[in-house]
Amino acid sequence: MNKFAIIDLETTGNSPAKGDRIIEIGVVVWKDGEIIQQYDRLINPNVHISRFITYLTGITNESVIHEPTFEMVAREVRALFNDAYFVAHNVPFDLGFLNAELKRVGLAPLTQPVIDTVELARILLPTAPGFKLVQLADWLSFQHQNPHRALSDAYVTTELLSRLIDKVNNLPLRTIEMLAKIEPNLKSNLATILATRQKEAKSSLEEDDRYEVVQGLAIKKMPPDHKVEHPTSIESFGAFLDQLFSNNGRLASEMDNYEARAGQREMAEHIYHIFQSEQHGIIEAETGTGKSLAYLIAGIYQAVSTNDRIIISTYLTLLQSQLMDHEIPLLKKVVPFPFTVVVLKGKQHYLSLKKFSETLRYHKTDNYDQVLTKAILLVWLTETKTGDIDEIQLPTSGQRFFRMVSSEAEGQLQPTSKPSMYSFYQRARERALSADLVITNHALLCTNMTHEDRLLPEFDKVIVDEAHHLAASTGQHFGLQLDYVSCLRILTSTEKLFSTRHHQIGGIKNDSDLSLFKETLQAAKEETDTLFRYLFHFVKGKQEKDRNINDTGRYQYTIVEEDSSDWRICLEMVSRLRFLLRDLTTMLEALYMQMEGPDRERFLSKTDELEALSKKLHNYFYLTSANDRISWVEIEATGAQNAVFLFQQPIDVAKVLKEQLFDKRKSVVLTSASISVKKSFDHFKTTIGLNDLALIEHKLPSPYHYEDQVRVLIPNDFPIAKYQAMDPFIEATCEAVFSLAEVTKGRMLILFTSYDMLKKAYKILREILADDYVIIAQGISSGSRERLKKNFQTFDQSILLGTNSFWEGIDIPGSDLSCVVIVRLPFESPNHPVYQVKSEQLKKKGKNPFMDLSLPNAVIRFKQGFGRLIRSTTDRGIIFICDDRIMTAKYGKYFIDSVPKVPIHYRSTNELLEIAQIWL
């Protein structure tokens, strides 16, 4: 069948069962690459069209009043799909809605093969930034005249389908064969399309030199890396900067609307000076300085001129991608000598060809997300040069699946004759050995500090961006985290080794050995369940009085010496579980010795996992009383009885960083837009262990004119926010947001310090604003942080609610963002176990925990939130702070004095709204 009927529906809502109806139908009939018919019809739904739907589509109640009802056109619409694929961008919605309406009017539903272009785009265009129709149209440079109008969307979907079929016809035969095996479990009926491509490829006996086959998988052929030859001598650093930064220099010639930034050159000079003097340095570069380009320029020059290797460490993988996708290509054009840059991440980021190939043999128990993930990975392998999973977006369960097929799941890497050809991770490490700049993340930098097999190549100089996260990253890395699900996952995946006809695996024929192994495995699973259930009730019992619940809705409990009698019961359970894990390891090693064939390595890698789990259990339960670390337990307040999470962190990461990083490297440059508190670096230096070292310190102000671009509004008539009685304050916040939205036309980012507050506010805002605005909320609206941001920018009238990670790293320049609402000053919970222990330590030293710990952390967080509003010289807007402690409390000046000087208005809400109206 080579006929496709591509449909798009506009409707009054998402549920025909609840009375929603079709208001427009667009169909394009496409056959043999030609459009042979089109259908475009407004429909009278005989129900009200909301303001939001009108805003989205442009279809009003008045425009459909004289149009036919669906009953009148149902037969002619249904006839369009005769002998054709049903194609839509999100088939479950369009087909489900259309069939519900056909049934309502007494016609038979459509049952022909379907193609879902959302699913197909996810598989065939794995590196696309998003899979909404408007995102794909923009990425593929389609003409999309009227988004959210039926016929226009149907035309764009037709163009997309054409591109997707072309992509299928260019895939290598091996990939097509693999896709054909998993196709029955996809939503789209692709069997005929894949079979046609398979037949053509076989008949032509094609051999495509773009690909090679490794582990039975078609992958993009990797050209050999050529070592870059550095010039024997290069000009001085000053002359180099003159070439780049002058008004008619190299940067100006390559950048549209180039603006010389004094701070950018100044920062590069400071970093070069730090390197030359072999000291450590702190540079705070406020928003707009252009710090990424500045430190890359300094790093490149240092690396090439002295044959040094420079490590650049970031906290967010998003920033790594930005550096590689934007800054590095620009610098390749403007720097007058060659240089090499590679990204190196932890093993969990890279696909293992060996592990992935193994999983393709077993798919009977796969859920839909796992099947979709396999299809995505198969196509992605024909494109990727790195094997880095951060290049693509996976479905939710796909992230869990990837952990099973990452390089980390391989255990200890075995030497191979051609490691770079068979391991993306090994290839990345090899390329890093000859690179001038290696971009990595804080987690790998921390791992490298103590790992026996150094993961990063040798280096003496490192630039740490987003340095305000370094202490927390160090604490997490040198700490420990364990939970019931991850423990059970290891045991269950071990059990799956025998999910097929186990007596035939690898030639093992001793059923008694296998039976004993399975009995021991079952006992380990039961012991794990018993242990975590006991911990759940243990913590719940301790918390009956205090009810210490954190922002994510979990009870937290710090383990103390007084728990010794109750804890002894835990230790007995842990001891039994570790004995069982040891027995399982011994049995697996014995089975491994009996085996032959490809399954052999799978058994060996499981022994590594079981040994690692046993070690984690020992370190957590037997080191809880150590005075250099803090251990605590969290349980889901309303979760299952084994929803238990174990945490352990060193108390003093400053000592770890001093000994493992600063004392061992010649120069460490620490930079961020948010390090200082009230113009001082003292708190930051204390946190990361730099108090007693000679440093070069510098602060670069933002080039933006905040006094002309920002107004800060603080209401003086809000109810007092009381713990466990927050509703009046949340309601007042939502009322202010409602009124502000009228002034700003949406375009608001609302920052919360608690997910519980966010959920309550979302519920209220949905009720009062849903007809006029798109409300997008972290943890409620589906998608990653970056996807939520893009959705926010897609709609003209939208409001974005976020907490935690939304206080930083969100870049929404221009008129897309007019207002940032800071609901509460971002103090961390005083009940958090790590805070409590550090607080006690400060008290013993005669210090004030609030002034020396809580307040500085809150100020840094506040600066990050404040920085979300102004991202360019032409931006302007409002920062609305609902928490008037910034004006009434003695410590409020610390917040005000730590951000750029701006006009502040502290008045009634009504007066503030008038100021906002005039200002905008």
Image: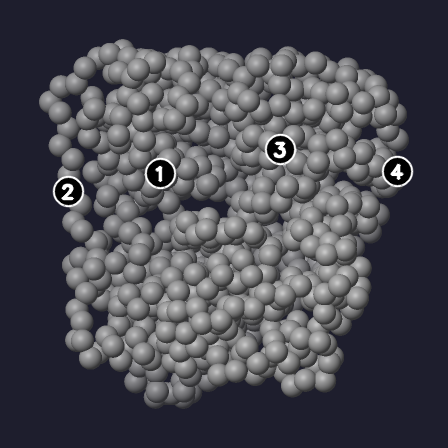
The quadrant where residue 219 appears: bottom left
Dot 2 or dot 4, earlier in sequence: 2
From the viewer's perspective, is 646 left or right of 395? right
User: What is the C-alpha distance between the residues marked 2 and 3?
Assistant: 45 Å
* On screen, residue 48 above or below 712: below
Residue 728: give its label.
4
User: What is the C-alpha distance between the residues marked 1 and 2?
Assistant: 19 Å
User: What is the C-alpha distance between the residues marked 2 and 4?
Assistant: 65 Å
Tell me the colour scheme of the image.
Answer: one colour
Residue for point 22% across, 66% down: 213
Residue 324: give its label.
1
Residue for point 40% across, 78% down: 2
Residue 817: give its label.
3
Looking at the rendered structure, the kind of residue marked 4 is Pro
SS at circle 4: helix
* Residue that numbered label 2 is attached to: 226
Looking at the rendered structure, the kind of residue marked 2 is His
Looking at the rendered structure, the kind of residue marked 1 is Met
Q: Residues within 10 Å of mark 1 (few under 14, many from 20)?
A: some
Q: Residues within 10 Å of mark 2 (few under 14, many from 20)?
A: few
Where is residue 313? Give x, y as percent: 40, 34
In the rendered image, the residue lying farthest to the left is 232
User: What is the C-alpha distance between the residues marked 4 and 3?
Assistant: 27 Å
Q: Quadrant of the C terminus?
A: top right
Dot 4 or dot 3, earlier in sequence: 4
SS at circle 1: helix
Dot 1 or dot 2, earlier in sequence: 2
